[in-house]
Amino acid sequence: MDYEAILKSLRKKILAPPGLLTGAWSYDRAAIASILPHREPFLLLDRLCGLDLEQAVLAASRRLAEADPVFQGHFPGSPVYPGTLQLEMIGQAGLCLYYFLNQQSRRIADPPRPLKVRATKIMGAQFLEPVLPGQEVEIVARKLAQDTCLGSVQGQVTCQGRICTTALCEVCFLE
């Protein structure tokens, strides 16, 4: 797979334009916590706001609170949300996407059974625009490939219609 070509294409076009995936389907932080193993302070998604199972794409959002302690040290006087945490947001959106794809349903199972995974690789990332305190960002993840062991996504962090970050990420499914 030509990862450089995929990354280059991610710089040019938003994977899911704002509003394209929105509708009656939405899950809040509590629901997200039921399908992800992450907890505070590393649960980095506030809302799942769009899902297209056929196209294998999921949209999520997060408001970056100005009071978030990460801004105190990254960087004093010129705060920017860290790129590694933006990659983590893309990864968490990707895990949510795989949760719904594996169930072939837009609903959370009762009881929910989070996927057990380990991050294995970042095939590439690009930080194109700063992500600042107080911004609301949209995170989009689209399935790139999946087999019985590995799954990968292409993802973007966008803000106000601008692509801020792009990434290609891979996980290993443990069960």
Image (tube, rainbow, N blue to C red):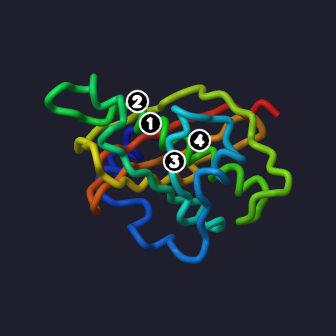
Alpha carbon of mark 4 to alpha carbon of mark 2: how far? 17 Å
Alpha carbon of mark 1 to alpha carbon of mark 4: how far? 13 Å
Q: Which mark is residue 45?
A: 3
Q: Is residue 74 left or right of residue 64?
A: left
Q: Which mark is residue 84?
A: 2
- Mark 1 or 4: the one toward you: 1
Nearest to N terminus: mark 4 or mark 2 = 2
- Quickly name the residue at label 1: 87
- Could you tell me which residue is drawn at 73 percent across and 42 percent down? 147
Please tell me whether mark 1 sits on a helix, a strand or a loop: helix
Q: Which mark is residue 152?
A: 4
- Mark 2 or 3: the one toward you: 3
Q: Is residue 105 left or right of residue 138?
A: right
Q: Is residue 11 above or below residue 82?
A: below
Alpha carbon of mark 2 to alpha carbon of mark 3: how far? 14 Å
Q: Where is residue 139 shown, x and y percent of the image?
A: 44, 52
Residue 20: name its quadrant: bottom left
What amino acid type should be assigned to the residue bearing mark 4? Ser
Alpha carbon of mark 2 to alpha carbon of mark 1: how far? 5 Å
- Mark 4 or 2: the one toward you: 2
Alpha carbon of mark 3 to alpha carbon of mark 1: how far? 12 Å
Q: Residues within 10 Å of mark 1 (few under 14, many from 20)?
A: many
Please tell me whether mark 4 sits on a helix, a strand or a loop: strand
Nearest to N terminus: mark 3 or mark 4 = 3
- Mark 3 or 1: the one toward you: 3
Nearest to N terminus: mark 1 or mark 4 = 1
Residue placed most toward the observer, 19 or 24: 24
What amino acid type should be assigned to the residue bearing mark 3? Leu
Tell whether label 1 touches label 2 (CB within 8 Å). Answer: yes
- Could you tell me which residue is drawn at 61 percent across and 61 percent down? 27
